Amino acid sequence: MINKIKLLGLALVAVVMSGCATVQLPAAQQALLDSNTTLYTQVGMWTEKGNVIATNYSRGEHIPVNSPVQITEMSASTITFHYGGRNIKLKNIEKYTKVDVAGLMTRTFAEKQVNLTQFSALEKTAIEQGDVVIGMTKDAVIISRGFPPAHRTANLKLDSWRFWQNRFGTIVYEFEQGKVSKIVE
């Protein structure tokens, strides 16, 4: 059993180090990839020049939550998906996201749309636009902006989340009782 675990670990290291090797996905995810099933974005994201960085800079074209997509390819660091008549590459930088590409796929795409009826009218409007406003819950912020980079926000239970606006600037959302209370640019 330990030899099998070591062998799997070595295989995973080889895949990650190659950067372009095919990722071995759990059966359910592989079936979705193989079938060209329509999936839906679970978070808002931004694309610039055909790329989305998994740390999710908020610049470029906004791809709203619940947008229909088809996954066309996966490697150890990239998920390529078809959206709006073109292919977009979602690039994972694991040292910032702290998840592998399979984990990134799970939290970014799903077979069902996000149920937005659980949110207030204010939250729904902000989510549709990819914005964060005072009074939003943590769940609404994640759906609107995606997950904060884990190297700057180590735990979602914290009351201060830092997101990248672009390569050089960040924005901090501070929470009180689970709702955005302050936005610091």
Image (cartoon, rainbow, N blue to C red):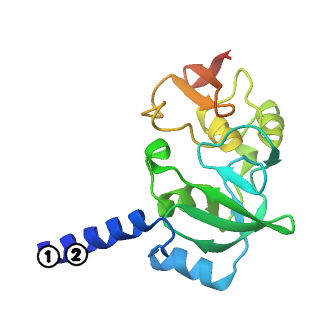
Pointer 1 with pointer 2, Cβ within 8 A:
yes
Q: Quadrant of residue 176?
A: top right
Q: Quadrant of residue 182?
A: top right
User: Residue 173, percent across and down?
Assistant: 62, 23
Q: Residue furthest bottom?
A: 35
Amino acid type for the residue under numbered disc 1 = Asn
Q: Quadrant of residue 85?
A: bottom right
Which element type, helix, strand or loop, lies under badge 2?
helix
Residue 64's place in the image compared with 17, above or below, is above
Q: Give the Cα distance between marks 1 and 2.
A: 6 Å
- Residue 113 as seen in the image, left or right of residue 103: right
- Residue 19 as seen in the image, left or right of residue 135: left
Question: Which quadrant of the figure contains the N terminus?
Answer: bottom left
Residue 136's place in the image compared with 75, above or below, is above
Mark 2 nearby-residue class (10 Å; few <14, some 14–19, many ≥20): few
- Residue 85 as seen in the image, left or right of residue 42: right
User: Residue 59, percent across and down?
Assistant: 77, 38
User: Residue 141, percent across and down?
Assistant: 65, 35
Foreground of the two, 42 or 11: 11
Residue displayed at 79% across by 53% down: 49
Is residue 118 visible to the viewer in this orientation of the structure? Answer: yes
Residue 30's place in the image compared with 15, above or below, is below
The residue tagged 2 is 7
Amino acid type for the residue under numbered disc 2 = Leu
Q: What's the mark number on residue 3?
A: 1
Residue displayed at 51% across by 77% down: 28
Mark 1 nearby-residue class (10 Å; few <14, some 14–19, many ≥20): few
